[in-house]
Image: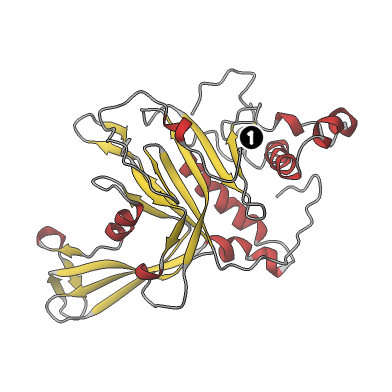
Amino acid sequence: MHSLSQEQVGHRSGITVDRKAGAGCFGVHRSASKYRQQYLGMSKTLAHCRLLIGSLQQTGFLCVQRTHLDAQEFSKLFMSLLEDTLSKQKNPDVQNIVQQQFCGEYAYVTVCNQCGRESKLFSKFYELELNIQGHKQLTDCITEFLKEEKLEGDNRYFCKNCQSKQNATRKIRLLSLPCILNLQLMRFVFDRQMGHKKKLNTYIGFSELLDMEPYMEHKEGICVYELSAVLIHRGISAYSGHYIAHVKDPQTGEWYKFSDEDIEKMEGKKLQLGIEEDLAPSKSQTHKPKCGKGTHCSGNAYMLVYRLQTQEKSSLTVQVPDYAHI
């Protein structure tokens, strides 16, 4: 969410993209020798990250509509495009890789108070959108997401069995979870008095290990997730600020910090968010609680990504051509 100059903004009909992103790899295919020294001194992880960002812009994959998107909107669009494109590939493992890794399922379950009839509406999801208002812990947000809701008065439910509107209850039941679980913290909410969106700078505590088994409809063994990425929104406004991503390498356990085109390896193997909280306090800022070992607290965490801890390493190897138009 930056103000970009004409030199930074792409002129093709597409998403507003900072041309600096991935600048270190724009010319890799055209003049390898020019960048050879830079990449020889760079780890494979950093090189691949920069190559990916640059290739996506080079191929025009990011250019879909001329709209400035926030991180959540872009994530949804990116996943949709990726799934649609990969579904056309010949390799069946590649065709379904997005659903296999990121897609879960839940059901909206409504029960009529009059006759007891239960109806279910099944839905796929790629992320869970969690309300953070009034909460201090991630687990509290998940509990509210699954909390039973009463349908009464003007909001009564039309029961097909009774053939009339009846009081009812409705709740979400988690049926299956993906290998990669995306949790969206709803920091941007609409303020009716102000007539526009505002950002909630509420501190939310979250752990490095998240046990989802208590929240599942069917108890099927261990369901422990490990924190693998944290997206930070720096800024007190919903209409401005800066996104920073902290991503964990599952192979080495090392954390990397992504800030536009800059990719930095963090010291040690512990997630460090302290510097991202160095902002002027706002009216919605709550007191930062103390965090114990293996936990983190953030007033700017916007999206949390957890990886199934028991997931076996994939043996799938996908060769991507240099100029592959994914």
Q: Give the residue at x 25% y 63%.
A: 147
Mark 1 surroundings: few (<14), some (14-19) or many (≥20) residues within 10 A = few
Residue 107: x percent and y percent?
Answer: 36, 70
Q: Give the residue at x 42% y 42%.
A: 302
- Nearer to us in this view, 202 or 207: 207
- Nearer to us in this view, 157 or 313: 313
Horizontal relation, residue 144 to residue 248: left or right: left
Pointer 1 residue: 264
- In the figure, 36 relative to 231: above or below? above
Callout 1: helix, strand or loop?
strand
Amino acid type, mark 1 = Glu
In which quadrant of the rendered view does residue 323 lie?
A: top right
- Nearer to us in this view, 293 or 321: 293
- In the figure, 26 relative to 170: above or below? above
Q: Give the residue at x 59% y 60%.
A: 98
- In the figure, 217 relative to 230: above or below? below
Residue 33: x percent and y percent?
Answer: 90, 31
In which quadrant of the rendered view does residue 84 lie?
A: bottom right
Q: Residue furthest left?
A: 153
Residue 259: x percent and y percent?
Answer: 58, 32
